[in-house]
DNA sequence: TGCGTGCACCGTACGGCGTACACCGTACCC
DNA sequence: GGGTACGGTGTACGCCGTACGGTGCACGCA
């Protein structure tokens, strides 16, 4: 338990939580209380609002008491992240409905996760060590794609690609929402304030393509662009699969 | 110039820079010097290292002098962001080589941008107002896809989707690199420290799919997964295009 | 020529942050 | 019943962004 592996304590906390002590006074808190209070605070007010002082106040303890449970704020964020990922009901129930509906549910769930917990997309966020929920997530993914004629390596690539896409789209959406909110305006107000300047510049001759755009060019909702890209990805995958089935088809005659 | 539009000053700075003053002493700096010093510092040491104090020291001025040029750190970040985006040579030269090679170059350039300037993926990053380089970027994109049989709205969706993908993949890659670097180890060391714990858990019976994975499952490079997903997207798009050409083909006989 | 004025420069200070450290008090083991 | 291991926390340090106000330069005008 006291190896020199520098990740030991992180891994220990993620997978086994705190060891329950025998001696000394009873702890006032549990690790879970701290982590979920952190998640609530970050969900409600953003990552900026999550300071150790505020979190401690919310839990009615002194600031430094938190450090009896968690070695640093970074480690707390790692725990918060793992606590928030993990298989959702939606995906569990779609695992046997064919790969396309499973992957659709997976990417939707990923996007919803990032939008529900925007703080997962903020900050330095050096990706933590893998925790139990992340691994359960991968386990479910691998189950959902078990029928696909792809190598395990390609399946893992697929997981990475789809998560990247969910993350990227959610991040873009969040940035616009934040930009408006930070300036204390709605999305529409934000646009309308920019429009005069943009229109002047676009019709200046420097941007002929931009000047000639349709009225509705910028009218897509985030949901629509997200769906569009998701269909591209899945269509591309379907292509891939058909091709690999065609390639292996001749061998079928051997049976 | 003194309207109550709350974005006026931001837009002014982005599009026109600072007005050159008539009275008083000559400014020691230019806006560009500040912005590019900020970019250099953030590139070299990350966004955390970019404090107003350090930036001022690097420029040999007092901390508060910076505020004569830039109203806040947030605004500085907006200017920095617009200063690093924009059409690259690679993309400009591929604009007439067919949509597929143009889009490939576009997404590659996007990914390279995010990897070269990882700070663009950090922090709150409430997306700023659109600056001249961002608009030039869109202009180029619209030129590159002008032949595609898609509505302007769909083309804009495509721009969003591809940027999301570039951003998502770059972000994932950066997170792993950071995670290792923050702990002061290489990527490989980071993996090897986690492996014992993961292997123990995976063979515990709770994760049968994970336990049965090929040896090479996790061996893909970031480049490989990125390429894989990019091909999926472009194949999907090709599908879309062929379908829409097929649909409109009957009309061709009218000619 | 000289002076008034508007702007550049920047030292100081305030309220936040993460967290190192040391001290206090509790509750179990022997 | 005493020793000891451990939970709780007050204080302090060195960072951060930036509000405020003082100082002195350089041009427009008399």
Image (cartoon, coloured by chain):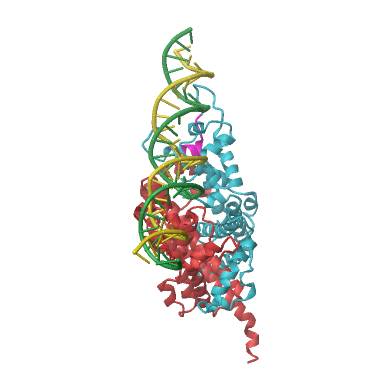
Chain colours: A cyan, B red, C yellow, D green
> Across the whole image, how many numbered discs are drawn on residues?
0
Stretch in magenta = A11-19
Q: Nearer the viewer, residue B128 or B177?
A: B128
Q: Nearer the viewer, residue B212 or A120?
A: A120
Task: Give how far across and how far down residue A51 sits, in percent.
Answer: 52, 41
Task: Give how far across and how far down residue A229 sits, in percent.
Answer: 58, 66
User: Which residue is farthest bottom?
Assistant: B255
Task: Give how far across and how far down residue B205 sits, in percent.
Answer: 52, 42
Q: Which residue is at a point 42% across and 60% down the rendered structure image?
A: B35
Q: Quadrant of residue B238?
A: bottom right
Q: Which residue is at a point 51% across and 31% down the rendered structure image?
A: A65
Asked whether residue A3 appears in the rendered view, the answer is: yes
**Magenta span has A238?**
no
Task: Give how far across and how far down residue A31 sits, in percent.
Answer: 54, 35
User: In what quadrant of the picture does the N terminus of chain A appear?
Assistant: top left
Q: Nearer the viewer, residue B125 or B108?
A: B125
**B210 on left or right of B30:** right
Asked whether residue B205 appears in the rendered view, the answer is: no
Q: Which residue is at a point 51% across and 73% down the rendered structure image?
A: B141
Q: Nearer the viewer, residue C11 or B80?
A: C11
Magenta stretch, main secondary structure, is helix
């Amino acid at each position: 338990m006291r190896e020199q592996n520098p990740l030991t304590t992180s891994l220990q906390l993620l997978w086994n939580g705190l060891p329950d002590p025998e001696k000394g006074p009873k702890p006032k808190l549990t690790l879970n209380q701290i982590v979920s209070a952190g998640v609530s605070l970050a969900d409600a007010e953003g990552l900026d609002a999550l300071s150790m002082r505020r979190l401690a106040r919310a839990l009615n303890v002194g600031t430094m008491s938190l450090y009896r449970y968690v070695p640093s704020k970074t480690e707390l964020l790692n725990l918060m992240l793992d606590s928030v990922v993990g298989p959702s009901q939606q995906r569990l129930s779609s695992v046997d409905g064919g790969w396309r509906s499973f992957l659709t549910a997976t990417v939707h769930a990923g996007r919803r996760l990032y939008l529900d917990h925007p703080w997962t997309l903020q900050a330095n966020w050096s990706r933590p060590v893998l925790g139990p929920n992340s691994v359960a997530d991968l386990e479910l993914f691998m189950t959902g794609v078990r029928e696909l004629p792809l190598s395990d390596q390609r399946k893992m690539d697929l997981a990475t690609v789809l998560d990247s896409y969910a993350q990227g789209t959610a991040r873009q959406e969040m940035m616009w929402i934040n930009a408006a909110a930070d300036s204390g305006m709605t999305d529409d107000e934000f646009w309308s304030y920019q429009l005069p300047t943009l229109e002047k510049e676009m019709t200046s001759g420097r941007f002929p393509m931009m000047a000639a755009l349709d009225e509705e060019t910028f009218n897509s909702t985030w949901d629509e662009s997200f769906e569009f890209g998701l269909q591209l990805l899945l269509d591309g995958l379907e292509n891939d699969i058909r091709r690999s089935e065609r390639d292996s088809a001749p061998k079928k005659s051997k049976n």
